[in-house]
Image (tube, rainbow, N blue to C red):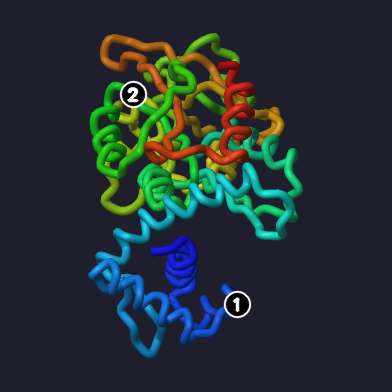
Amino acid sequence: MTLVQLHYLITIAETNSMNKAAEQLYVSQPSLTSSMKELEKELGISLFYRSGRGVTLTNEGTEFLLYAKQIYGQYETILEKYEKGGTRKKKFGVSTQHYSFAVKAFVDMAKEFDMSRYEFAIRETMTAEVIRDVSTMKSELGILYLCDFNRKSIEKLLKSANLKFYHLIECQAYVYLWKKHPLAGEKSICLEQLEGYPCLSFEQGDNSSFYFAEEILSTNEYPQVIKANDRATMLNLMVGLNGYTLCSGIICEELNGSEYTAIPYQEDEKNPNSTMEIGYIVKKDTMLSKQASLYLDKLKKYLHT
């Protein structure tokens, strides 16, 4: 088994085609096919289902691909650190729950690189997708939060995916709303005051678990709830419907604008406050790329950790 074969495998899986992969790799299609058959023979498994419409990974191939990506990703990281010159574009991606500070750190990181030499990706997405993206190495890092309610379930998922969570910051719940909201002048806001306004939350997909909710205090009963699937829509709903959401209180005015505010949530006996532990997830026992290390530095600087 060689690094070249692993590179071939990853490219075939990305294109779902031997012909397209051969074009991207600048090798002949027969040579590519022969190389994969040799790899299958060495491993003693079938990596692909082959048909007239292309190739798809077998179950064993899908499992092996994860290891191949991890090994080849480490190889690329070493090359990046020690190789001089070269024209190969380097990839770096982050998957995150909907946090403007995560995007801000990404912007600050990207500005320090010649972006014509890189393929950068920032993915604001559902909690399960954040975990899946990092476990399949679609993204090198993931940003999400833990609390007393979701910790056991999320940590179980991370363990099964061979991922590790690293702490960044802890914060209490804040009510995030439009500055012209009737409650925007309050020093703190309790749940009873919010009963007449819609609670906004991010969709987590069909049949999603309560443990995947991005909003802290997600187990409370809210008379009005509206789901959104992106941050811009949620901000529009705050303005149009005087909606609100419960968040970390960390606001990035540079990206979201100055029309919104975060006010401390005031707990009561039925609706206590809770602590959000925001952190990042990575594959266990992996060496971070230069981009990932710089991204984390920017993130910590912004969060003052």
The amino acid type found where label 2 is placed reads Cys
Q: Residue at x 47, y 54 (%)?
A: 72
Q: Is residue 83 visible?
A: yes
Tell me if mark 1 has few (under 14), some (14-19) or many (20+) residues whose alpha carbon lies within 10 angstroms of its own.
few
Q: Nearer the viewer, residue 40 or 125?
A: 40
Which picture quadrant has residue 289?
Answer: top right
104 in relation to 208, above or below:
above
Q: Which mark is residue 195?
A: none
In the picture provided, is 35 more to the left or to the right than 113? left
Tell me if mark 2 has few (under 14), some (14-19) or many (20+) residues whose alpha carbon lies within 10 angstroms of its own.
some
Q: Residue at x 36, y 46 (%)?
A: 128
- Identify the mark nearer the N-term, 1 or 2: 1
Q: Quadrant of the N terminus?
A: bottom left
Q: Position of residue 203 (x, y in %)?
A: 40, 46
Mark pair 1, 2: CA separation? 49 Å
The amino acid type found where label 1 is placed reads Tyr
Q: Position of residue 222 (x, y in %)?
A: 34, 30
Q: Dot 1 corresponds to which residue? A: 26
In the picture provided, is 12 more to the left or to the right than 179? left
Q: Which mark is residue 147?
A: 2
In terms of secondary structure, where does tag 1 sit? Answer: loop
